[in-house]
Amino acid sequence: MSDLLLPLLLAVPLAGCVALLVLPGRTADRFALPIGLVATALTMAVALWSVFAATPYNASWVPSLGLRVQLGLDGISDPLVLLTAFLTFLCIVFTVRVQPEAGRVRALVGLVLLLEVGMLGTFLALDLLLFFVFFEVVLIPMWFVIAQWGDDTVPGGRVRAANTFIIYTLLGSAVMLLGILLVRAKTGTFDIAALTASGGAGMSSNVQVLVFLALGLGFAVKTPMWPLHSWLPDAHTAAPTIGSVLLAGVLLKMGTYGLIRIAVPVAPQGAEVVAPFLGAFAVVGIVYGALACLVQRDLKRLIAFSSVGHMGFVLLGIATLTPVGINGALYANVAHGLISGLLFFLVGAIKDRHHTSSIAELGGGLYDRMPRLGGLLVFAAVASLGLPGLAGFWGEMLTLLGAFDPAPGLNRGYYLTLMAIAGLGLVLTTVYFVSLIRRVAQGQTAPRWQQALLLRDATPLELAVWAPVVALVVVLGCWPKLLLDATDPAVRMLLGG
Amino acid sequence: MIPVVVAILAPALAALLGLGAGRRFPRLVVPVAIAGSAVAFLAALVLAARAISSAPLHDRLTGPTVPTGTFPFGLDVRLDGLAALVSVAVAAVALAVQVYSTAYLKGDPRYSSYAALVSLFTAAMMLVVFADDLLVLLVGWEVMGVCSYFLIGHHWEQEGARAGAVKAFVVTRLGDVGFLFGIFTLAASVKSFDIERVQAAALHGQISQSTATVATLLLLCGVVGKSAQFPLHTWLPDAMAGPTPVSALIHAATMVAAGIYLVARLYDVFLLAPSTLAVMAVIAAITMLGAALAALAQDDIKRVLAYSTVSQLAYMLAALAVGSAGAAAFHLLTHAAFKALLFLAAGSVIHAVGTNLMRDMGGLRRAMPVTFVTMTVGLAALAGLPPFSGFFSKEAVLAAAEHAARGEGPVATWAAWLVLVTGLLTVGITAAYATRLWLMTFFHEARGPVSPHEASPAMRWPLLVLAVPATLLGAVGLRSSWLPGWLGLDESLRPGAVTAALSVLLAVAGAVSVALVWRRAPATDPSGRLGRFRPAFARAFYVDELYDRVAVRPVRSAARAVLWTDDEVVAAGSLGSGRCAGRAGALLQLTQRGNVQAYLTGVLAGIVLLAVGVVTLT
Amino acid sequence: MPLLMPLLVAALLFSIGAYGVLVRRNAILVLMSVELMLNAVNLNLVAFDVWLRDALLSGQVFTLFVITIAAAEVGLGLAIVLLVFRNRETSQLDLLTELREEPSDPAGVGTAAR
Amino acid sequence: MAGTQAIDYTALAPALVVAVTALGVLVLDLFLPAGRKVVAAWAGTGGLVVALATLLPLVGDTRRTFCVPATNVDPVSCSYVVDHLTLVFQVLVLAGAVVVMLLSLDTLRDSRIPAGEYSFLLLSSVAGAVTLAASRDILTLVVALEVVSLPAFALVALRRFDSRSSEAALKLFLVSVVSTAVMLFGLSLVYGTTGAVHLDRIASALARSDGRLPATVLGVTLSLAGFGFKVAAVPFHFWAPDTYSGAPVPVAAYLSVVSKAAGFVGLAVLLTRGFGPYADVWAPAVAVIAALTMTVGNLAALRQRSAVRLLAWSSIAQSGYMLVPLGSAAHGAGSVDAVLPATVAYVLAYAVMNLGAFSVVTLVGRHRPRNAIEDYRGLGRTEPLTAFALAFALACLAGLPPGLLGLFAKVVVFQAPVEQGVGWLAVVMAVNVVIGLYYYLAWAAALYARPAEGARPPSYRISWSDGLAIGITLGAAVWLSVLPRMVLEALR
């Protein structure tokens, strides 16, 4: 029975989505949100249950391709599965009151459920091709969420933003498919567990470099790594609130999770050759993201660029190829998912109230006119800049510790310079977040908002949605053992080979 | 070991309650905050009593270890003489500040968040004091930083507060990055984050001198940042924009002293690196002298005290540089007492007169007798006049410097001489600016607009309470069984004969010269005599402007450059490829213009090309 | 008679037919040129058949089929040309460009999705 | 030559049934009153279904007929062989024809096309296609190819009063005739240099001859031309956009699916059975053609505003994808058999996807003759099921989930060049998949976008034959997305 848990985990949101599609128009519209709530809540429950009780599931789907539905959970994917189920549930709850005005709610809930299937599938898949299929299931729903419910006042329009998002990601995943097929051509199997155990045995070292480059490119676009990031600000700014929460909270993690789960173990020698370049791009990403945020004019774009910086840390952690580096990467992954999710919820709430997210128009004084929302924004900003005692710190600290003494094959001096620049990036991150607090939260309320009536502070429902995220950020900050106990053994086994 | 945990958790709990329920139960805020600090103070007293009774106190409580991937770290706390005494100082000042703030910030709309943040700060400081794991210490270290950021920015309506808060947090954060790398170097060499094991390794010589030097220099960045020493001192004067009790607690007694406390805690590692000690000596000398001179020319009373704090901290760093952790701890304790007293007194003066600027003050001697007396005690201790605590602790430092100058200390003799000379010189200058402050504030006729009145009891009592240690704490250093014993050190902290005489002479000379200048023109500011040097001293040798040009402007222009590249180059790249695909499509459309024979030409041309290609290539 | 001569003639004939197809404007003449090309193939096939002295005579059988195919194609071709002439009053090939590709605005299909 | 050839009529049954039905329909048309002409079309469809039924006994063993006695050099070789490859394509051709027939019922009524002649021509073309799948010598191959093509020209020109149709037919005719002439010239050279007409004998002759005669190489290359035209590969693709937009939409559907499938089976038979030993000669050429076809098809499709024209360019691009496996068979006969199943799988998947798209385009085309992409705006709101069918077909064509059928087919096709080591072709295809995504997605988005201001959201009267066609194709696509074994392992 326990091996049916994982397929059940995927079946519940899929059933919800199909139900919304099949039900006749009138009833589906009325019951859209209840179905969404039940489906996501059930998924969360099954996720929690399967984290403890699930055993790997294995069934053949397309024998000729060698595609098998292989699902499994271990220390690396547990936190991400829980994070996905948790954030999706919060998004649906958030939609209950904040009805996105454009388009129908039924379609939105259906799309979010389909998104959840794709995301959960990506984290559960233990078959390379199955991972690729779920990796792509996410694209079309997110495209429609951005293009139909997005904010059209973005420069260039929301459809172009959605297009750049999907074209960038698809280019990456097309190249990733080539990598996957090359692996199969050389080793004859798609099974990740077997490939990890064999540690890239079937492939010569330059084939492994080719495989790592192909897989790495696909994941780097999704992470996003520095030069391939230009889709992120447009997509995040144009996406509706729950869209950007899921985009930042989970979709970015699929890239780094892929690197850790697939690219590094399957092609270890390739990883060793490419890791220094990956580290260099990561560090440039950190500094580039931080500098870009310093002078950003739009609040949502600023948070999007902060994701480029934070994911730079995660990539640096992976580039060290050490257990502590990868532990740091996973921790930063989960922490960034929670904190950026919270930041986008808050910025979305601010934007819904002020109908603008440009910092100049918002003016200062958020503390003054909306103390609770202002306080939460400052909390999230401080958590995001990596204050110890909050979730953001441990990931970045472990990454730097990993860079301090990287894997034996890597050049130590080079990684020390990377660590130093990343440290500088840390300070720049503090600078732009603190100046964000100064420009938005502190100071006087602009006259324009003084007499605006609709500026209510955070509503009880919003607080109910955000409170668990805040609590998790604090718990993960004060008690890192909770997450590290789960990831450390899995990472040691992964790198131990 | 229970009191240690209580000392940390009580204020933390108070903070949590304050932040959480502050808005809904405003009445509960003040009692909860004070209760938190009081419980912490009692716990600290119990610990101090244990430290005094069983002299070389050493105790550990190890919590769960957290796996990281390489060597794990654990939630451990430890108790020894130094920790107990410093925790008493912290708890005492925190309690005084909490009580004082109830009056000073009466009616402030955001008092609940203020009190909660002060409690959180106290808990963080306690964590730093009692931490036995480098990472746990770092957590406390940075939580203190963020509390100071929020508290400086308490009056965020004012631009000064916002700017001061940002500057304080960024500069300390810069230092903390170096601090983090120092922790990595140290922990990697010992394969553990545990301070106990680091000290043991240092004593048994398991840490090589080069690693020790690199680690201590990096740790020094953190210390210099947090304790506002020479390169990273610019944030402390601007931090005065925060409420005065905050300045008293954080920017006088506790946070800024955390750096010195850390060096004292890891002193065995520092002793392995004489070159670091030399660097510390140089930094201490520069900071000591520069800050004292700057204090001489300040007009705002709080900025005078801020620069004075920087200078006094340099004394403690100097003591550590010349090899005497005991002197540093001693001066730390006495400084905590009299500097907190000075700030709170200044607070009541500002509260009465309504402005910080000394040129609007005067003649407060009669109007505010209690403040006058306690401030005089404080200033005397600061100047180092004999009966007061300041004299004894400063003498301990100078004695240690003289001792090292004779060649017996761990540091190079030239560094010891540098410390000794600048130390003595600064004693004179300190006495000068202390007297200037004293005269301009309390003597001559009242220049202030409103009639000044004495502070309310809630503000007066803390002054009186703090005045006691400010005067008597000096005696603690006389017997070697007292303070040195409690700290577990076997060095004597009695003032040396020669240095004591010299420093008293210099102090009196400084005070008298300022008094003479003042007597000639009581209405004007005595520092006017500095003439051409005054603006330089007032602007603290233009270090701020230098940093602005060297660091702030380049970063901002780099940011604009990054934004430009992002909009133009990277985005254009992605759009460009889309557009050129479209143009290629348009080009292809030209081949489909409908003429059949054009199609046939294309077909036949294609066939010919294909055939020639295949025949020639295979 | 050496094999080369008929092959050369066939190749020449094929090229002339191709040239005729590309150059002549009138549809009928283009059809005639196509016939030339097909007959060139026939010549080729018969020449090979004789040279191979194929027992199954498959070359000549192939020629018969090609001839029938050519006939069918011409019949159908003329019918289509007749239709074109009736609808457009012309059989000049270069005037028949009603189905050309109109260069649309740069956004192309993308505008539909706005 | 004593004794008659033993003819295996059960093997011939499908072709015979279709041919006889065609003639029957032509005769029946004479007796039908003007109003009842549609009955002829129904009879034709019935014939096709019967032909499908006759395929059942042929499953399993390989049946040979019209065989030539062995000579001292070669074994017995037959010119009509029904093996697994043939059966798969015969099913595809007949099923495709049934769906096209369903689509054409309403179009015949609306645009005054003579139903009798239409059905006769369609069925005769299908007969040709069925024969082509089973032909194993170059004579039958050429004749069958012509039998597929000639009725197609007539079908395109059947709207006699529409100058666009006649122009389209003329263009199709001319390009086809020229390509056939070139192919015949090539085949004559091949016959000349190998001395054989049956494909297996040609293959053994090519394998025997050590040196590579330039004439043979030229012959092999030129003989690709005929099928290149049928498949609308790059140098021969010029006719496709004009013909598709000029012809009635069901005929365009027929050309893009059934006649293209016939082209591919002809190519597959010719290259694998006949020119196997020369794989290292034609494989690089096919690879280059595939790359060019994909890129030209996708780039031009970016610019299209009319639905049928966009589907024309899209089908050219899809042909490029189908040619990729054949193009990566560079290591001799062994690799050819390895890559053939990939092409067959993709052709099957493509047939289902494309017919799905065309069935909805035919429906919309009847109500909006202009048939531009703008006419599809907001279809999702008024006709949810039809819009979903088109969106699903487009997702399959783009190769993105939820269109899993397209995704699996593309993965199979991608596998061929990666395994055979033709890396550059795989990368070109990867880029093309991304370009392709843009216009499929833009069209799918238009379905669900808000209708243009002022324009009444489109709502159409769906006749049950249209509904049936859409239902069959959507059902097949969804079923094969979940269980693609049937398509992907057609040739295992």
Image: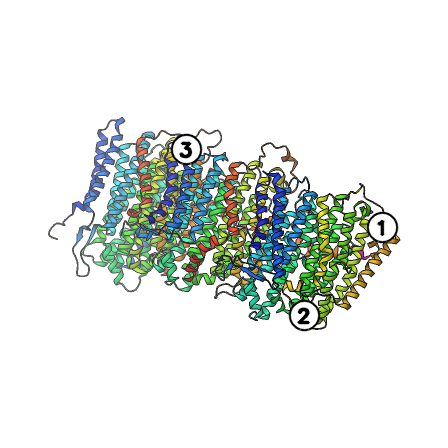
Q: Position of residue B600 (x, y in %)?
A: 38, 47
Range of residues picked out in magenta: B531-535
Residue type, mark 2 in image: Val
Q: Chain of mark 1?
A: B
Q: Are marks 1 and 2 on the same chain?
A: yes
First along the sequence among labels 1 and 2: 2
Q: Tell me: residue D17, above or below residue D78.
A: above
Residue type, mark 1 in image: Thr
Q: Residue furthest right?
A: B520
Question: Mark 1 sits on what residue?
Answer: B524
In what element is the residue under mark 3? helix
Q: Position of residue D210 (x, y in %)?
A: 28, 64
Spatial separation of the CA atoms under disc 3 and disc 2 = 78 Å
Question: Mark 3 sits on what residue?
Answer: A31
Question: Mark 2 sits on what residue?
Answer: B411
Left or right, D274 with respect to B408, comes to left
Label 3 close to label 1 by CB (< 8 Å) = no
Spatial separation of the CA atoms under disc 1 and disc 2 = 45 Å
Label 3 close to label 2 by CB (< 8 Å) = no
Residue B540 in view of the camera: yes
In what element is the residue under mark 1? loop
Q: Position of residue B183 (x, y in %)?
A: 57, 61
Q: Nearer the viewer, mark 3 or mark 2?
A: 2
Task: Work out whether residue D18 or residue A326 is closer to the camera in this orientation and state it.
Answer: A326
Q: Are marks 3 and 2 on the same chain?
A: no
In what element is the residue under mark 2? loop
Q: Chain of mark 3?
A: A
